[in-house]
Image (spheres, rainbow, N blue to C red):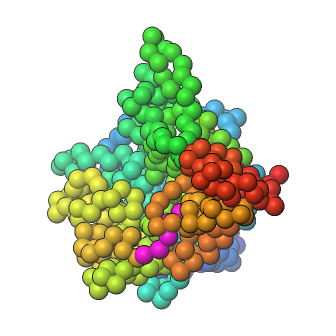
Amino acid sequence: MEGEQRANKTSRSSISFSIRFSAHIPQHSSLSDIILVLSDPVCRRLLWSEGKSTLFPMKLLFLLLFTPYAILGESPDFCPEHPVYGKEPEEDCAQPSDPNELPKTPLERWFTKQIFDDLFPKSNIGVGPHPCLPYSYESFVIAARYFPEFGAAHPNKQFKADEHHKRDVAAFFAHALQETGENDASVYNNTDLTLEQAHECFYRGGFYNWFERGPNSSFLLPTAPGFSPADGKRCTEEGRYCKSDPILDFWYLCNSDTETHSDTDYHKGCYFGRGALQLSWNYNYGLFQQFLLTKGVKVDLIENPNLVMTKMDPPLAMMASLWFYMTPQPPKPSMHQIVTGDWKPSSKNRRAGYQGAIFGPTSLIINNECGGEDPDEPGGPGESRRIKAFKWFCKYFKVPVGSDRTLSCKGMLDGFDAVQHMYSWHPDWGNMWKSQSCDCAPAPYGGPLPYYDPKIYPHEFTKQNDRNRLRCVYSMYESPETFRLDDGNSPCLKHKPKIRLTKTGIRG
């Protein structure tokens, strides 16, 4: 009898608690709705404390709290099987780590492993999220710690703080889906799926590809076609993506080594697209390498560009993509600046509504795409896919997308260069004749050493200006022939700077 009373008390308490907990979850909720609720730290603490205090069955409580780890990382049951090209790593594989042991960022307060695994069940060429492969929650959060403003900035009141944070992450994921998603449009021809189910299958295909052109990439060796991250260490001539001129060669001279397989020469200096946002070209690998050096991470990506895919301490595949998303390249602001509204549009663009926290101009930044959104589903690649993906991720996170018109950049009246400012450091040509050491000055054209105008760009970038100026000065003394300088046309070369200069701007 006493046992029955305890059982009845447990049952009544469990029912009462279940009713209170269900109030947090909207009616007709999808799996993603429940996951977002279970991922909320406040809700999880409530679930744990109230569940214990009401004698809620511990086995069920445990399942509610931890089942997401088991069920996520798999596509919804109604989705067709997706191709899997890779294989799960061995148990003793190298997991991502951070040599700098940077602290957690506010992003980690709301973006959980459950959410990542739910969104990207097809990642890593179909294997799914795995800490030893390029795309995982573990790699994502370590990479984000090097960019603490990502998913955490709210520089204006156009949206609520949490809306700014989630829109920022949604924009990054949207571009990643276009660049390296599975993008299997055939799910929309599957008559067994509703339109909403087709969306669920399609937009959960992000972080799929590692290399440009995917597995079986024509850039790679046929016997190492991209089924392993290590396969990208050599490529055909077509995959070199090496830009060369005297100034670029001084800073980012491409690796010219080759190796022969089956009577065919393959290059080791391959700068084709790698990672979620497809870091491409030798100069971008060089700029990312310089960023890493400023963080105490020494790695030679010009000599060995495939380290972007294989280095896990820290995990560079995720870091390279976040770096590209978060970093301005004058005259372009960063995509992060656009989405959060921390950018300076021209007066014409402001009149056209292109100002504040919007999405459209990010497509112009990443790939000069301004074709607008296609009316059909899923539409074609390019800007249309970026827009549709952004809308889907915003819906997932339950945040507003903003004005429909500014989801595309096709209504912009000006390019970013309409806001006049200087872009990069170059020799100060007007003062080369003086009897003093040579110097550099900002110029209104591009170059390998960015100049960040304090009126345009955030302080975290403008503080790099002094270092980049001294690197520019170093290049004149180290390689005057690069700039066609000599003692005759540039007497300043006879006067050495009083401070020690280095190519990286970092001493020691």
Q: Which residue occupies 51% across, 56% down? A: 447
Residue 449, image x, y percentages: 57, 58
Residue 10, image x, y percentages: 62, 73
Front residue (pair 244, 88)? 244
Q: Which residues are magenta?
A: 420-425
Q: Is residue 239 above or below residue 3?
A: above
Could one spot residue 138 in this view of the protein?
A: no
Q: Is residue 453 left or right of residue 226?
A: right
Q: Is residue 344 magenta?
A: no
Residue 272, image x, y percentages: 45, 39
Residue 337, image x, y percentages: 48, 73
Q: Is residue 358 above or below residue 295?
A: below
Q: Is residue 143 left or right of residue 348?
A: right
In the rendered image, which quarter is residue 346 located in? bottom left
Q: Is residue 424 magenta?
A: yes
- In the picture as drawn, the residue positioned furthest to the top comes out as 263
Front residue (pair 437, 43)? 437
The majority secondary structure of the magenta stretch comes to loop
Front residue (pair 7, 128)? 128
- In the picture as drawn, the residue positioned furthest to the bottom comes out as 157
Q: Is residue 322 left or right of residue 215?
A: right
- In the picture as drawn, the residue positioned furthest to the front comes out as 488
Could one spot residue 373 in this view of the protein?
A: yes
Q: Which residue occupies 57% across, 39% down? A: 253
Q: Which residue occupies 30% across, 82% down? A: 348
Q: Which residue occupies 45% across, 62% down? A: 445
